[in-house]
Image: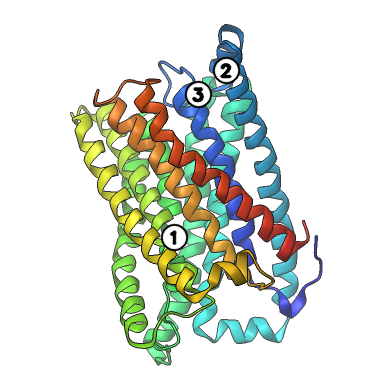
Amino acid sequence: MRKNLGAEYSPLYFLASLGSGGIAVSFFMFLMFMVNHEGRPIPVFEDIQVALVAGGPAVVTLIAVSCAGILWYAFQHYRLLLWNIKEYNMFRGTEAFDRLKSSDAEVQLMAIPLTYAMAINVMFILGAVFVPGLWSVVEYLFPFAMLGFLLVGGYAGEIFLVFFSRVIAYGNFDCERNNSLSQMLSVFAFSMVGVGMSAAAAMSHNVISSGLGIILASFFAAIAVTFGVIKIVLGFRSMLSNGVNYEASVSLWIVIPILTILGITVNRVSMGLVHNFGMEIHPWFHVIVFSVLIAVQVLFGMLGYTVMKQLGYFKEFIGGGGKSVVTYAAICPGVAFFVLGNFLINKGLVAADFIDKFSIGYFLLYIPLLVIQVQTIRVLLKLNRKLLSV
C-alpha cells in the first residue's frame, strides 16, 4: 500500500474504505433476508448457528460465502480507514491542505465523518454475526451506538458549517466550476448518520431508546433532504450551462446511495413506530416507497452511465490508465442499488405477499442485483490495485 503521500493525498481516499465497508454490508444482506431470525430484526450468531446445523449444502454455502465476504471486506474497510487517518494527519501539515480549506473542494472533508459512520455500522454487523450472546445485551449497546453516531454527526456538522458559512459570508463559490454533484457529499454524510440512528429506532424495544432513535434519525434525514434539494439544483444548473466536470462526472451517481440510505431510514423508523408506539403501516407502503426510490435510482444510474460513456470516462479511469481518486465514488452506487433491491424484494414484495419467498420469481429478481454486486467488487479491486497498490 502506498505511504506518505503528503500533498498528493486527498480526503476522497476515505471513499476507498467506505466502499469496502459497503460491500461488507452487501454480503450481510444475504444473511439478513435468507436466514431465519424469527423474533429478532436481524440474524445473529445463534440464528446462523442453527441454520448451519439444520440447512443443506446450499444454505451452508450461502452462509460461508456471506460470512467470508463480511470478514474480508470489514478487514479491508478498517485497514484502509487506519491508513487514511495516518495519511490525513500528515496531509494537514501541507500547503495543499491550506488550499483545500480555502476552496470549494473543502467539502471533500465530509468523506471523513461519512466513513466513520460506516465504521460503526460495520462494527454492529460484525458483533451481531460473530459474537455469541450479543443480542442478550443489545439494549445496553444502543445508547452507546447512538452516542457514537451523534459524535460523528456533530463532527460532520462542524466541517459543513465551517465550509458553508464561509462561502455564504464571503461568497467566491465558483458555481461554474462546481458543474457536478460532488457537493452532495455532505448530504451523503448526514444521511449516513441518520440511518445509523434509525437502527435503535427499529430494533430497540425500549421506548426511550427507540423514540430517541426516531427523533435523531428524522433530524439528520431532514438536514440531508434540505441540503440535497439545494445542492442538486445548483449542480444541475451549472452542468446545464457548462457541461459536467469530466473527472467528477461519476458524482451523478451519488444520488443512488443517498436514496438507499433514506429509504432504509424510513423503513426503520416505521418499524419503531409499529413495534413500540402502536402505529399500523400496511406492507404496501414500503413497496411504494422502495419502488419510487429505485425508479429515481434507475433514472440517475442510466443518466450517469450514458454521460460517462459518452465522455469516455470508463475507458480512461476504470478500464484504462487514468488515475483519479474521485473514481472511488463509483463503488457506493452499486452497493446501494443492491441493498435497496434487497429491501424492495423482501421488506416490500414478500412482506406484502406479492411474491413468495424462495420462489422462482424471487430468485429471478436477484439476478440483476447479483450482476451489479459482482461488477462493483471487480471495479473496487481494479481501483485498489491502480490507486493504492493493494
- Dot 1 corresponds to which residue? 188
- Dot 2 corresponds to which residue? 58
Q: Tell me the residue at 56%/49% (across/down).
A: 375
Label 3 to label 2, Cα distance in Å?
A: 18 Å
- Dot 3 corresponds to which residue? 43
In this rendering, the answer to whether 255 lies above or below 138 is: below
In this rendering, the answer to whether 150 lies above or below 290 is: below
The picture places residue 108, in percent across and down from the top left corner, at 54, 72
What numbered label is drawn on residue 362? none
Q: Residues within 10 Å of mark 3 (few under 14, many from 20)?
A: many
Q: Amino acid at mark 3?
A: Pro
Q: Residues within 10 Å of mark 1 (few under 14, many from 20)?
A: many
Label 1 to label 3, Cα distance in Å?
A: 27 Å
Label 1 to label 2, Cα distance in Å?
A: 36 Å
The picture places residue 312, in percent across and down from the top left corner, at 53, 73
Marks 1 and 2, the one that precedes in the sequence:
2
Secondary structure found at label 3: loop
- Do callouts 1 and 3 mark residues in contact (Cβ within 8 Å)? no
368 relative position to 282: left or right:
right
| Colour convention of the picture | rainbow
As rendered, which of 152 and 179 lies closer to the eye? 179
On-image quarter of the N terminus: bottom right
The picture places residue 318, in percent across and down from the top left corner, at 61, 64
